[in-house]
Amino acid sequence: MKKAKILIVEDEAIIAMEMENQLQGLGYEVTSIVDTGENAIKKAEEDKPDLMLMDIRIKGEMDGIAAAEAIRSQFGILVKTLP
Amino acid sequence: MIIQKKLTIFPVVLTILMVVISLLIMMLISNSIIRKQIGNHLWTTVQSRGSHIETLLNNYKKMVVMMASGNAYRGAVDEKLDYTLGQQRINKRINNVINSYPEIERMRILNKKGTVIHSSTKDIGFDKSDKAIFQKGRENSYIGEIHKSEFSGNIVISISTPILVRKKFSGVLVVNFDVERELYGLLTDRTGMGETGETYLVNKDHYMVSPSVYNDSMFLKTKINTKQVNLCFSKHLEKGLINKVQEEAIIYPDYRGKKVLGIHNFIPEMEWALIAEFDFEEAYRPINKLIVLVVVIFTVLLVITIIISIQISKNITMPIVDLHQGVEEIIKGNFDYKVGTDGKDEIGHLSRVFDLMTVRLAESQNNIQKHTNELENKVKKRTNELQETNVQLQEQLVIEKQSEEKLRLERDNLNSIFEAMEDGVCIINQQYEIEYVNKAFEKSLGPTKNRKCYTYFHDRLEVCLSCKFNDIHRKETIRRRWDSTKNDKIYDIIYTALKHSDGSISILEIFRDITAQMQVEDQINASLKEKETLLHEIHHRVKNNMTVISSLLRLQANSMEDKRLKEALMDSQNRVQSMSIIHETLYRSDTLSAIDLKTYLSELGRIIIQNYSISNKVQLKVEAENIMISVKQASPVGLIVNELIANCLKYAFTDDGEGEIVLSLKSIKENGIELTVSDNGVGISESFDLKTVDSLGLKLVTLLAEGQLDGSIDIERNNGTKFTIKFNIET
């Protein structure tokens, strides 16, 4: 069975690492970890993940919500925002 | 007395009136009769005398014509005959004629040139050619005017006629007749002329040509212009009337100036007016006599009437006078006086009825006196009462005046308070008119000039809907904020109803300028908002940092091989996480100072179960009330719950056993909270004691519950284990 691909958008590196650890422990594939909305869009297009976990407060011009909206409408990828 | 006078005077006046009227009528009738009779008589006189005069003059004329046709007179003027012979014959003839006709006073013969050729007097040779007797006489027989003879001084009338010789005019015969002999006799005849009656002739020149009874010098000297003469000549000479219709006698003053009754007759041949007159006095003498007689008779009648009427009135009024006296006596109060008589007429009856009335009157008088006395007493009593009331009223008036003064002072004070207030005050009556504003109001919002409130405040023409539909005059105080468009200020207005004595209600409005206050408030709110944002940020930061710590601990734990170390790190990670959830819950909620325990503990419980349970067979049931708690207390409560649930998960259930943990939270008493964590697991050993427990987790629970929350902790062992913690919310 193919592993589900997850892309993590989190500017707090340790938290991102812990999440990656946990997700891998649960049997998922973490494709990338990015810390800005712009990179998230870029990586979403490249990686084409099954799910994106998106922190709302992130670095860069865009916040999580705006990035999630853009990705949902552009690529139809499921994005879960994290408070 | 008045009745008596009336009864006396009335018949007398009536009698006098009748006498006067009768006299007037009688005078009118007899006047007319007399005038008619005398008029008739005078008319007959002038008619007969006039015809006599005409006849006489005609006779004279005939006589002269006859004489002129005689040979003697013709011969006298015949030029062919011998003059001397003729003269003797004619003289003889003339003398014969004068001697045989006494009325002929003088005779003359004029030749055809008008010169006197024969005369009975000594005027032969006189030229008469320019005289009327020749001028008229040569044509036809002519009767001249009556005149005084130059020779004899007699009053005569000349008649002349032409003498024809062989049918040729040859001379004129002139005969003078003495009028005093026959003509005047006709006029001065007094038959039927009474004492004053007279008839006389007036020629066309208005001269009297006959003798006057009263005045000898009238003849041919004074002109007569009486009404009668004028009437006669105007009728017959000027208008040429000749008819002999009977004239009416008229009354006028005659040539003497005396009042006469007269009539005229015109003699056309001579153009004479024949006047007949009677003195008015004589004509009416019979009437005067009659009037005197009638007056005497009526006077006697009047006297008799007076005497009789006095007597009758006395007879009628005497009983009335008696009755009157009686009544006067009764008026004086003498009710015993009797006026009754034996008279059988109406007055007698009246007098007896009057006596009866007097008796009744006396009775009613007594009654009236009685009533009057009672009434007087009542009036006295009432007057006293009224005086007392008056005194009371006076006192009351003084009190009222005092209270009025007090009221006035209070009102003035109130006014002063209003004027001294810094807040604007205005009073609006029920008709929405601004009745009063204080100084502060005027200064702040400007003068009101008795305008309607809706016009003044809101520039409206009608009552504002808020006032129209919500009775602004209801009796309660309300408070409203008003953003004035008049001066861009903000007012806090307090509306209070003022009740008046007449039942109407005014609205007292107090305007407090809160513009500055509102500005400060806005600043504070902005600052607060800023701080809240900051606090959210901090909580987020704290939560993030704690999550980082928690992640580090989990990463560390995952990298450990030793199960005990791994567990210790996991416990620590859970403890950090339980605190981090507080901050997460806080920044997600609206309130930053307090946290809802139900939301917090539910989330915490879910995370702990997720972290510990591997098989997912243990269920957590949360039965909690919504209780707000401070962050300071939320932290130990979170740690206690974390330890207790972790404890349950670690020890209460066997590895693959199913179970249920119940977390309950309810408020008890005033500020108390009861928190229980119970399980249906294997149960704790009987020897377990919180005081001596070796586990760090349960040590922490006791420490936090008793030390930090100042609460209590109890364990129950009944079908599992139940921890109960009670503590008070810090306020």
Image (cartoon, coloured by chain):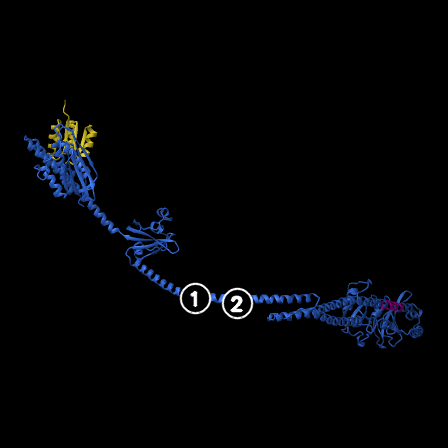
Chain colours: A yellow, B blue
Q: Secondary structure at mark 1?
A: helix
Magenta stretch containing residue B56, yes or no? yes
Q: Nearer the viewer, residue A59 or B42?
A: A59
Position of A1 with respect to B342 (left or right) is left
**Residue at screen point 88% across, 76% down:** B121
Quarter occupied by the N terminus of chain B: bottom right
Specify the subunit that label 1 lies on.
Answer: B
Q: Mark 1 highlights which residue?
A: B388
Residue B497 image position (x, y, % from top left): 34, 52
Position of B715 with respect to B232 (left or right) is left
Residue B201 image position (x, y, % from top left): 82, 70
Question: How far apart are the alpha carbons under marks 2 and 1?
Answer: 23 Å
Residue A13 image position (x, y, % from top left): 11, 34
Q: How many C-alpha atoms fall within 10 Å of the one at disc 2: few (<14), some, or many (≥20)? A: few
**Residue at screen point 19% across, 35% down:** B622
Magenta stretch containing residue B279, yes or no? no
Specify the subunit that label 2 lies on.
Answer: B
Q: Residue furthest top?
A: A1
Q: Secondary structure at mark 2?
A: helix
Name above or below for residue A68 compared with residue B480. Answer: above
Q: Nearer the viewer, residue B455 or A26?
A: A26
The magenta region covers B49-59
Name above or below for residue A12 compared with residue B445. Answer: above
Position of B628 with respect to B281 (left or right) is left
Q: Residue furthest left?
A: B562
For the question of whether residue A63 can be seen, the reply is: no
**Mark seen at residue B373:** 2
Q: Amino acid at mark 1?
A: Glu
The quadrant in which residue B555 appears is top left
